[in-house]
Image: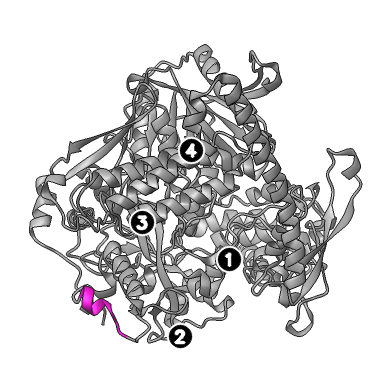
Amino acid sequence: MSQRNEIAAADDAVSAEYETVDRRVLVVGAGAAGARAAIELVEQGVPPEDVLVIGKRGHGDAHTTWARGGINGALGTHDPEDDWTVHAADTLNEGHHINDPDAVEAVTERMPRLLRELDDWGMAYSRTEDGGIDQRYFGAQSFRRTAFAGDHTGESLLRTLVAKAQSLDIPYRENVLVSRLVTDGDGPDGRVLGAAGTDLDTGEFVVFDTDVVVLAAGGYTSLYKRHSSRDDENTGDGPALAYQAGAELMDMEFVQFHPTGMVGDRYGEDWDGRLVTEAVRGEGGRLFNSEGERFMEEYSPDQMELDARDVVARAIASEIEAGRGTENGGVYLDISHRDRSFIEERLPRMYERFDELGVDMAEEPVEVAPTAHYGMGGVAVDDAGETRVSGLYAIGETMAGVHGANRLGGNSLAETIAFGEVAGEAIAERLATAPDGRDSDDLHQHARVHLTDLARLAESDGAHDPVALLDEVRELLWDASGIRREADGIEAGLDRLRQVRERASDLAVGDRTSRSYEFAIDLGFALTVAESVLRGARERTESRGAHYRTDHTERDPEWRRNVRYERDSVGGMHLSTTPVDEPSEAVQAALDAGHELDYHQLE
Amino acid sequence: MSTQVTEQETETEEQSSHQRRRLEEKAERAASRDRMRERAENDLDEADTTFTLKVFRYDPEIPEKEEPRFDTFEVPFTKGMTVLDSLMYARDHYDSSLTFRHSCRQAVCGSDALFVNGTQHLGCKTQVVDLGDDGGVPGEIRVEPLPHQEVVKDLVVDMEHFYDQMEAVEPYFDADELPDGMEEQRQTRENREKIKMSSRCIWCGACMSSCNVAAGNNEYLGPAAINKAYKFAMDEREGENRKQERLEIIEQEHGVWRCQTQFSCTEVCPKDIPLTEHIQELKREAVKNNLKFW
């Protein structure tokens, strides 16, 4: 179903061939969310040849593999009093009640069944004595609810999903970078027609002619200086593509800083910001400052190291700022009071990694500091995962709503699986009733405009290196919208962003298979996302969850609202706010019951 | 704010000022490229230790590069440097066309299996100092693409055949029957332990490349695929019927019986999977299985 077309550009110098791929559903992103959505489509009866999953990385190497600690679902393996309403209540509490309650309930209610389904598909869960799916404590959760496979849960999860997708013959194509969604041009009231991008292996342009596009393309935290992702992933592709196509973004100002990232000055630059899984604390790991004090006793005597991620991250940042950090700029995380065999079994990858770096976790602490880890914000969607642009869906980290102002550890993998299923169901139903006829002329016309731009971008001989500009965005976001924020700093960040934007119009770029070409496209995504984060942070004059303003340190009840971002008719970014819905009675009852984690059970 | 002033001037002046700025910036960029090279020279001067990276080069699409050859790069050693780090150093400082696969840099994605000093290694997991004599930095490191696979360009090989062999063992979980409703499948800790090592495979292809049998017989399933079959056949959640079917697949002409227990796959596996042991165990299972039908 592939054909070649010629770009009939007015400017012959940039004309180029492109390949057209005709599929009813294009899933952009081959991590857990994308894979799970594709599986659902086919299980609901959509023929596999109507679906294509594309990834910008190689085989089975999506960012999901970096998720370690676990995946939440109220199985109640150890704690029978747990159920999905308590899971929902914990999620809303952690999100400081600006989550979308319907989205939260969709995830938490589905997860027990979906965890068992993964087991049916061969997931390598760690096991209890009697062969059940084991569950452990994770921060700010009332019960042991986090199922896991050692400390390589994401890796095992993605392998399970990839194998399942292979068994269903779901087509997959790697190393394709989508840089534009094509719509009929009606903005918010529009309809998606397809997508355009580049095969990074061959440098060929590709146009996808589709009924439906699912964005499962990850988040945006690698746009921060210290971050837990690879540099070329989580660059904001999903939100930026959706925004450009006319969808709304939401909650972009909420960025989670994971408390325990590795410290580059101690372990080498390559490791800077890489995650030390929360499971280390879930299994009893303790934090100490350079004076040997277990400082969480000051900040959170009841929940200690397992308080919410924002609380622990700010505590660590405060200790370091007060001069009680290590000489490498971190604090100590110590689990050496546990037996070696316990650590090897429950935290095998961490144990192995530090062992290779010459650190024995069974004998000594590791050095950690906060790192940008997860964007709670993303694309605003309805209960089916659809944006306001007809036929455009966003799921996984790309969507907003499940996590609100902060995310529970173990809820991101849960969201990928749950919303993969939700969107898959909805799209299958849509395809069953919708006629299979598309307006391909319109698609090609719009796509050619974009491909002409891309052809000009490649091998352009301008003044600025895209990598250097991306690094500047990373610096300014870290400075202006990091763990602590205030008005003047944010303004300064917006100024710096304007300067980067100016220089970004004059780039030095290699050919279409070069890294600089990919990074030049990422830079485009980054500029949109960075503007939304900064402007949202400026707008929200309170502190809530992961968003902490040193000039507005209290939570303001008036601000129990979501900030939304849209592209106005002349291309500027327009912000507005909307109120939050109320949870169902069942979940309200769980909230009223006031469950919370009691750390001392762990000791 | 100087641009604001320019905007008020006449168009030609604006253009020429733009042009001047562009030229200046271009000159700056050319200088920065030179600086990169200079920096490499400085790095080399300042480094306590350097080593020579000898890299296989081949590009069928460029006439002057279609003849395979070796290029050498002088690389300054830094503490903790891996073979992948040294390749990236060479690419970033000397020759941006040097091509190799890499992604996660933490031995998860399996994309950078290479032939280093005559043995299969994962580039990101191989410390430069581990290649020298007694923990020292070696004088030279030779890096080639995985043997027995077709080279696409420089260090990149075609993995198609490897993936086909993996596919042949139906590498996906498929239980005979599933529990009803909210019931959970059970798996003992012992069983999970038993298949744990087999599930560590990252599809890097090092084992297949090291195997003499696979090199001589294109049909042989190879260690990675058989290990995959082991993982599922031994998983007690799948059930007896499925296990029989799996044993039939690996018992066929180009399956387990081809293995000559040379242990080369086990030696090179970057994830320490006891591949040969797993193949042997499947042979025993297959024998046991056949005995039933006497």
The CA distance from mark 1 to mark 3 is 42 Å
Packing grade of label 3 (10 A; few <14, some 14-19, many >=20) is many
Q: Nearer the viewer, residue A320 or B170?
A: A320
The CA distance from mark 3 to mark 2 is 30 Å
| Quarter that holds the C terminus of chain A | bottom left
Tell me the residue that label 3 is attached to.
Answer: A482
Residue A216 visible in rendering: no
The quadrant holding residue B18 is top right
The CA distance from mark 2 to mark 1 is 30 Å
What residue span does the magenta drawing correspond to? A293-300
The chain carrying label 4 is A
Tell me the residue that label 2 is attached to.
Answer: A364
Residue B107, compared with residue A529, is above or below; it is below
The chain carrying label 1 is B
| Quarter that holds the N terminus of chain A | top right
The CA distance from mark 3 to mark 4 is 20 Å
**SS at badge 4:** helix
Instruction: Same chain for labels 4 and 2? Say yes or no.
Output: yes
Tell me the residue that label 4 is attached to.
Answer: A501
